Image (cartoon, grey):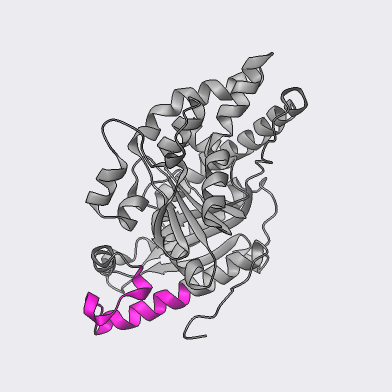
Amino acid sequence: MKTIAFFTNSSGAGKTHLVYHLAWMFSDLGHNVLAADLDPQSILSSTFLKDPELEVLWPDAGPRRTIFGGVDRLLNNVEDTAADRPVGISENLSLIAGDPRLAGLEQRFSEAWSNCLADGGRAGDGLRVTTVFCQVIQVAAASVGSQYVFMDLGPNLGSVNRAALIAADFLVIPLASDMYSAQALRSLGPALREWRAGWRQRRSTVAATGLSLPLGEMSTLGYILIEPSMRENLPYRAPMKWVDIVPRVYAQEMAEQEASPISDGEAQHRLFRLRRPVGLDHYARDARKPIFDLSPADGAFGGYAAAVQDCKKDFKTLAKKIMTFTGGEPKRPLDDD
């Protein structure tokens, strides 16, 4: 099983769009995929599921079949295996639903991070809490036989995201071509370096606790630059300068990260340059489909039909690239292969 986190501390970068479409594309290519919504905003969950379905998962009282339910069960030693069952989306695509209550655990995870370096039982409890996302994800993935787990995290540098990233084998950084992504990188790079070093220090206590702990290296595959569809008129020219600036900032601020597997000149750290189709998101949301599966019956006709095919080509290329860098390969061809 390979766990990939899609994370940046800039909102609106397009990470949920990426996770949703890559989960479907990997599924189309024959892999069993688990999408884990670790963002308290739960936008990924609301993209997969309709509101009535989410209401069932978020009862006011009782256990919740969400990421919070799974974490809460382990933190409080509650016997409720229902919280560990992911929601089935398709034959080989499942979802650990998000939950707004996850935001209320920031202090608990912050205290646990400090306790990892304490004496006696506090260290063991700190390590147990800090690795709880890893435990929840492993149990859920095993229950449905997932080969890939895609984690969608909230846009912040809080303690919940730090604990979540420890569960990741790989890290992909979605970036928008705007100044917000450039500014976010200036704090993201130092934070990742600090978290990596901090986890190595805490892992060194494992001999005293007897716990089996994840490596937590958060190996960075690179970034995906997500661009708006451009037109030649003036309102759309301004973002174009950030297409050049953001990669330079990434190289500066992430230079101390692990070497990227990508080495093609100026795009050394870039996994992909993705153009997001304009006007198709609401059709996809209404149909509960990825954009590349929209049909004329869903409203994707005329000029939109070409955009649907371009989207399919882009995500298939990106999916295969990620598979290559993580040691996987397509298990079945798509219709247009």
Q: Position of residue 230 (x, y in %)?
A: 34, 70
Count every numbered label the image shows and give the total: 0
Q: Which residues are magenta?
A: 290-314
Judge from the rendering whether residue 106 lies leftward or rightward of residue 128; answer left or right: left
Of 119 and 280, which appears nearest the observer?
A: 119
Of 246 and 258, which appears nearest the observer?
A: 258
**Location of residue 310 with respect to 267 vertically, above or below:** below
**Location of residue 158 with respect to 188 vertically, above or below:** above
Judge from the rendering whether residue 107 lies leftward or rightward of residue 64; answer left or right: right
Q: Quadrant of the N terminus?
A: bottom right
Of 140 and 255, which appears nearest the observer?
A: 140
Q: Position of residue 327 (x, y in %)?
A: 68, 64
Q: Main secondary structure of the magenta part?
A: helix
Q: Residue at x 68, y 36 (%)?
A: 213
**Location of residue 86 with respect to 193 vertically, above or below:** below
Q: Residue at x 44, y 27 (%)?
A: 106
Q: Residue at x 57, y 40 (%)?
A: 134
